[in-house]
Image (spheres, rainbow, N blue to C red):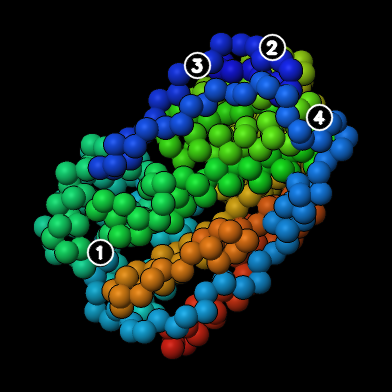
Amino acid sequence: MGRNARFGWRKHGIPSAVACLTVVLLGASCASNDVDSSPRSGSPAGEVSADVRSSVEIFTQKPKSIGIVEPLKQKPTGKSVAWIGVGTANDNAAYGAFTEAASILGMEVQNLQAGADAQKEARAIEQARSQGFDAVILSGLLTSSIGPQLQSLHDSGVKVLGYSTSLEGNSGPSIDFSFYSLPEARRFGSIAADWTMVDSSNDADVLVAYPPDIDAAVAQRDGFVDRLSDQCPNCAVNDLEFSMSELGSTLPSRIVSAVQANPNINYLYGVFGASFVGVPEALQQAGVADRIRGVTVGGIPANMQQIADGKVLAASLDQGLHYRGYMLADALGRLFAGQEVPVDVYHGFDMPVQLHTADNIDFNPDLEWSGEPTDFREQFVALWGSETSHG
């Protein structure tokens, strides 16, 4: 386990090195993850600040507007698009909605199915360049190893649009625009921390599980820890680093061991929904599930069921998966039309988000998603000058 720090006056444990995923062609370095144990001005146990409570109240509400007002000047009719994704359940849901939106806009789409493999991703990028696609959607995390292929792709005139590409802003070398930048990832973490403080009345001892080789995950971890350190001097953080290969396999047992080793731990923050796969069952079998409350970001349908059933996980901060597909199609259309891609459209985020709890999961997560406006499709197509229908 990494650090175990209680904010305010005590810090114990040995800091562990956190490896950073190199940002494509940027050579950017990661910020230090050391926890500052100096006294803070946050609220003591039982007293949650109005700012924190307001944040939770805002984000538990269902979004009503996409927050984009400028119409698309010209449809990208006839443009060809290659989708290169990581193949997760969330990624596949977004891809399905993207193909739906792309059809409305007159674009042709092909899924090159790279998966979470850097070599396959590099080959898919080269394939997109050699086959003459007009644009590429990169849905997932990038590594430095694909830098040459990505630069060659962009230099050939192909539009490159990303989602979760580990940039410190919305654009970077060889990427025209990217959603879910590192600052936004940090803010996701801070809102998860806000919920934790409200739910615990500022008395949370949190096990934070994250993969240290994924920049967005580290950013979410940092946003969570920084917010707690500022607002909750009585709270504590215990880091648990894991690799992606441990999801649903060895990670649940490692979480159980960490909880058993520290009887003070009463909260679990997994930086994305898949980190909770198999965890409630493992904690239940070990007889410690009743003392743990969980929170995550980017939940999957199984997480919504865990929350509804009261199985450890109690909150998840989510983007609309189908909304993401339409958002990417809209952004790509604007890149082709020479328009700016809208940012800061929903309380400081580039997309609507919602904090899901047992109180507001009133939908079937296998069919719909509550983190997006109910009529988001109609709102987008009104900007495109189109009509749409969907099943």
Left or right, 271 with reference to 104: right
Numbered tag placed on residue 168 in the rendering: none
- In front: label 2 or label 4: 4
How many other residues sit within 10 Å of disc 2, few (<14), some (14-19) or many (≥20)? Answer: few
The amino acid type, in three-letter code, at marker 3 is: Ser
Amino acid carrying mark 4 in the image: Asp
Q: Please state if 185 lies on the left or on the right of 179 as rendered.
A: right
The residue depicted at 20 percent of the width and 63 percent of the height is 158
Look at the image and tell me in which quarter the N terminus lies: top right
Residue nearest the observer in this picture, 277 or 128:
128
For residue 16, which numbered disc appears in the image? 3
Name the N-terminal-most of marks 3 and 2.
3
Q: Which residue is disc 2 drawn over?
A: 261
How far apart are the two marked residues, 3 and 1, measured between alpha carbons? 39 Å
Mark 1 nearby-residue class (10 Å; few <14, some 14–19, many ≥20) = many
Q: Nearer the viewer, residue 23 or 325?
A: 23
Q: Residue at x 66, y 66 (%)?
A: 63
Residue beneath disc 4: 203
Rounded to the nearest angstrom, the CA distance separating label 2 from label 4 is 19 Å
| 1 or 2: tag closer to the N-terminus | 1
What residue is disc 1 on?
159
Q: Amino acid at mark 1?
A: Lys
Residue 67 screen position, x and y as percent: 57, 72
Check the image and report above or below for 164 versus 347: above
